[in-house]
Amino acid sequence: MLSRNFEPQQVEEKWYAHWMDRGYFSSRPDARPPFTVVIPPPNVTGVLHMGHTLNETVQDVLVRKARMSGFNACWVPGSDHASIATEAKVVQMLEKEKGITKEQLTRDEFMGHAFEWKDKYGGIIYHQIKKLGCSVDWDRVTFTMDEHYYDAVIRVFVDLYNKGMIYRGARMINWDPQAKTALSDEEVEYRDIQGRLYYVKYRISSEDAEADEYIVIATQRPETIMGDTAVCVNPSDERYAHLRGRKVIIPLVNREVPLIFDEYVDPAFGTGALKVTPAHDINDYNLGLKHQLAIVDTLNDDGTLSEAAEVFVGLDRFEARKKVIDALRASGQIVKEEDYQTRLGFSQRTNAVVEPRISTQWFVRMRELADKALTAVTSGRIRIHPEERFLATYKYWLENVKDWCISRQLWWGQRIPAWYDEKGNLYVAETEQEARKAAVIENNTRLVQDEDVLDTWFSSWLWPIEVFHGITNPGNQDIKYYYPTSVLVTGQDIIFFWVARMIMAGEEYMNEKPFHDVYFTGMVRDRQGRKMSKSLGNSPDLLELIDKFGADAVRFGILIAAPAGNDLLFDESSCEQGRNFNNKIWNALKLVKSWESRIGDKPASDDAETHMAIEWFRHRLRRVTADVEEMYVQFRLSEALKTIYSLIWDDFCSWYLEWVKPGFEQPVDPSVYRHTTQFFGDLMQLLHPFMPFVTEEIYHRLGEPKDDLCVRQFAPAQPADAGILQQGELLKQVISAVRDGRARNNLRPKDAVSLLVQTKQPGKYTGIEKILRKQLNADVLDFTHESVPGTISVLCGTDTFYIRTEQQLDTAAQREQILKDLEYHRGFLASVEKKLGNERFVQNARPEVVEVERKKKADAEQKIRALEESLSGLS
RNA sequence: GGGCUGUUAGCUCAGCUGGUUUAGAGCAUCACGUCGACAACGUGGGGGUCGUUGGUUCGAAUCCGACACAGCCCACCA
């Protein structure tokens, strides 16, 4: 006895263990073509959010489909050490739980704690991936701090350094004062902020102590005044022409600085005078370089004012801003204040306001790498989906990319393999020993390794290569077989961070793209269109969702709402729809299983009828299978799922099963049983990549298959017969139309009727008469040449069905309905006639289009005649 | 400031190179239904002048222009 509803919890664990047991997800190179996917590695100590859920589900669908289509499917799982994010979490944990600050620990001690943390929490995402049913190869789990991976990163660093593509130098970089590290340009997020613009008087230096000459500048950041080393105006600005050659006194610190002239300054903005702070603004920095200005760095690592500021030393920058404003107000040097809309850079990880700052860091030269990555895509060697939207973004970024700041002032990550001797000479090599050997350094010379680690993305850009040990063991079997990978599925938010850089690394180290296709999924938002985030609390917990609805339903729920590349509004109700779908399939299984005990010995006498149903569904299945195949090619997975959903729910359950279903306690035609279980199995196969658990369970309950659905290979495509499909459509159309006529006249399903059809081609109903009678509870189905008074008339195509019944009929309601239909068809006829009456249409349109219009006209006229006849039959 | 998307039923979306019966689906809604697979269900219905506005064309949801609104990306105007 089957349970009332499908119970996912019992089934999911069983099948996942079984698949693992059989090693279906493990892949070794063999004679089959490979289908390779590398997972975008989630943060090792994170949890999967709905964005991951979408990406992992899409990948699993593609991988499972490939595995069932003759490919050697390999999906590599793993996680990312996420340098800055993880280090921040570990630091926080240490302070909170153990009362230890990072400063109290040695580097080694800290790393110990970090690895401990990773071991404790690193398993969560893997557990979630399993629960979701992802068919990843667990023998290939890779972590970006694994020993070989660490080595690969170091090796690549040294190699790029030796090629002159990595350099060290003082540049203006983005500084995160909270994490106390440099960031790359991509790690800064700009947001619009309501700021305030202060107009400040700067005195003009003069021999005459009594003189009250000054120049007014506008600034949003008064706390940087102490770092000013010039004031700049436009050379064409006549207001300031007379001040040429004079000096300006910086308020608060009373430093005398030059007044300089540069086209850069916009005379129309503010007062047309700009304070120049080369240490804390990129524009000012460039201006400083050009005019050889002094640089006064007034900030410490943590965003407090440094000794160089002279005043408010040690105060936080925002605190200092208030104090500076107070002081300037007190001395009457603020002449005006106004609100000002501005943009500020925030650290992507810590959300701290980023400070532009001059700092000595390591950089990767991007020009050459970017050019290669650009060609790989513009030449069509890598295809981006959906292309239109992302190709332009990708190109623009690569054409304008600046050098990549890769050093981070952190401990959690790959430590930069550079050593310095006491004189400050620099040696780059994979190990200290090699550095000594290469540079012939005397043994007693002390070398000190660079304290910094590398940007996380400097390791993840090697992901598709080093998961197969392609850097540390070049040319091995795996890398040769699995690389380039087939498709990369990821969020569009990391197109620059990761996708573009993987292409660079692939071109540089494999001389080959890392993947054939890139599929960008959209951003998952909540029902109100808000981004899902922890702080809003609108991101559902994946395990709770799975617990509530089952993994298949969650996969269904996220996929059904996800058109390629578009953001999707996720709502639990779509998981509910998935759960209902599970139950629908389960109930169909219950029906078919109930037939098992009553399979007849002989074909039923009316097998010609069921034959039609079977043939129709056979061809319907073929047609939809081909459609779905095409959708896979175009990565239209949401549409493919919808199509399969409708095939199962509507075509199979609502139509086919109703047509072939035997009467109560009647024997089941053996051919019907055989075909139905076969169709059911094929349907489960078609659906399996999307909903693996329920389909595997049902497939096994249908019979005792020799293979598991998980690895059952799709049969070659077969053509669908359009004529048979059309007859099925006619059948559906008539059934719906007559049911509608019955319903409108309050006939109950159990009220038997007689049917008469007024048609010019009675032949088209041959073969479907019996199904029609059964479905419509009609004792007779006859043909007629004229209208039949005293019946319910229903227009179906150009034929009219007359429903004869004992019941009292409401002729007024029928008349109303017919008049409404007449109005519609007359309106339609008028529009067609207007078209055909247009000479230019008849002349210019393609003949077949005109022919269609003529057919429309004839049909409409016939329908109107039929309706008019029915109308007169009513009176 | 530059660029890229989108705007079709209450909601989420299809509708590809203009003509396939005066716009389709799912969800929601309404009516009827407990009929021996299924109320987490069945049958049926209602619901849109395709953002606005010009243009191209015999013909536009579909192509072009402008505008409005929404979203995203990029940019060094204090």
Image: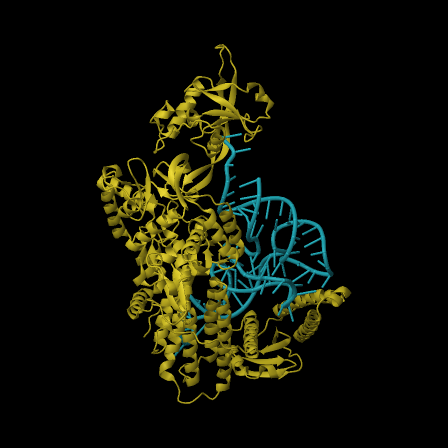
Chain colours: A yellow, B cyan
At 34% from the left and 37% from the top, the residue drawn is A180
> In the figure, is residue A758 to the left or right of A291?
right
Residue A172 placement: quadrant? top left
On the rendered image, what quadrant is the C terminus of chain A found in? bottom right
Instruction: Please say if A664 is above or below A526.
Output: below
Task: Decide if residue A29 is in sight here.
Answer: yes
Of A663 and B72, nearer the camera is B72
Return the x and y of residue A371 as percentages of the image width and height: 49, 51
Instruction: Please say if A347 is above or below A551.
Output: above
Return the x and y of residue A765 as percentages of the image width and height: 58, 82
Residue A3 placement: quadrant? bottom left
Of A530 and A235, nearer the camera is A235
On the rendered image, what quadrant is the N terminus of chain A found in? bottom left
Instruction: Please say if A821 is above or below B50.
Output: below
Return the x and y of residue A660 as percentages of the image width and height: 46, 80
Of A93 and A495, nearer the camera is A495
At 67% from the left and 68% from the top, the residue drawn is A825
